[in-house]
Amino acid sequence: MIRSLWSAASGMLAQQLNVDTISNNLANVNTAGFKKSRVEFQELFYETIRAAGSTNQVGTRAPTGIQVGHGVRPVATQRLFSPGNLQKTETPLDLAVQGEGFFMIQTGTGKTGYTRDGAFRLDNAGKLVNSQGYPVLTSAGGQITIGSNATEIMVGTDGTISIVASGSSAPTNAGQIGLAKFPNPAGLNALGGNVFEESNSSGAVLKGNPGATGFGGLVQGFLEMSNVTVVEEMVNLIMAQR
């Protein structure tokens, strides 16, 4: 009786984490670049009362044994990096990666962060930054300065930024946005603010330019939305609560 209570309690604790994870997915259904998570479970050890193949009371070998499980535990929250739908914004600095790759930004600690959220803006110095004010980086790690006198901004599928300055009709090159990818993106650490960081599980970062082999191209005037499906998450939440 006591064993059954503890086994049931382990299931309730595991499902509580499942509910928390699904709730976070639903909360971020409109977060640009958000990637949903899924909890993975693993059964606990088994107590063997009688081993399979042991000799029973009548001298024959039992075809099956007797084992009693001791519950369940969560072993991972797997982040799913399937692409989200592209939403048209018509804002020239809203960018989406169509394919594989992450935008690179320089975080407040000076480290490089990685994101699929391409809602970029210009700061007071004319640098290309994300919504938190972190500079967007090139594949070589440099920052991109567009300037405040640009009347037209064009971003190619290869990440090249062309601007037309006030009083000029000829476009000039303002830099090229870089992308990064990892052997195991599910191993990235989430920092919040739609930003990830490299970890030992993600593998070493591989940098390149949009459109290069293995990297997706950029789409200007679009944002990649969350890959959360509301109906699917609501069904999962009902099942977890049951």
Image: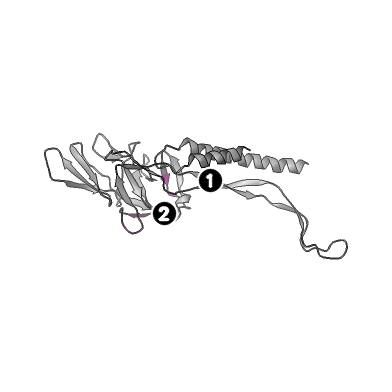
Q: Position of residue 133 (x, y in %)?
A: 32, 36
> Which secondary structure lies at badge 1?
strand
**Residue type at mark 1?**
Arg
Choose top left, top right, bottom left or bottom right for residue 8: top right
Whether residue 199 appears in magenta in the rendering, the answer is yes
| Relative side of 118 to 54, left or right | left
| Position above or below: 98 against 240 | below
Choose top left, top right, bottom left or bottom right for residue 242: top right
Residue sitting at the far right: 58
Q: Which residue is mark 2?
A: 182
Which region of the structure is painted magenta?
196-214
Q: Assign the N terminus to one quadrant of the image.
A: top right
Q: Position of residue 221 (x, y in %)?
A: 29, 42
| Position above or below: 42 against 147 | below
**Residue type at mark 2?**
Phe
Whether residue 130 appears in magenta in the rendering, the answer is no
- Given residues 132 and 170, the one toward you in this image is 170
| Relative side of 47 to 219, left or right | right
Q: Position of residue 49 (x, y in %)?
A: 79, 54
Residue sitting at the far top: 124
- Given residues 230 and 168, the one toward you in this image is 230
Q: Which residue is mark 1?
A: 38
Q: Residues within 10 Å of mark 1 (few under 14, many from 20)?
A: some
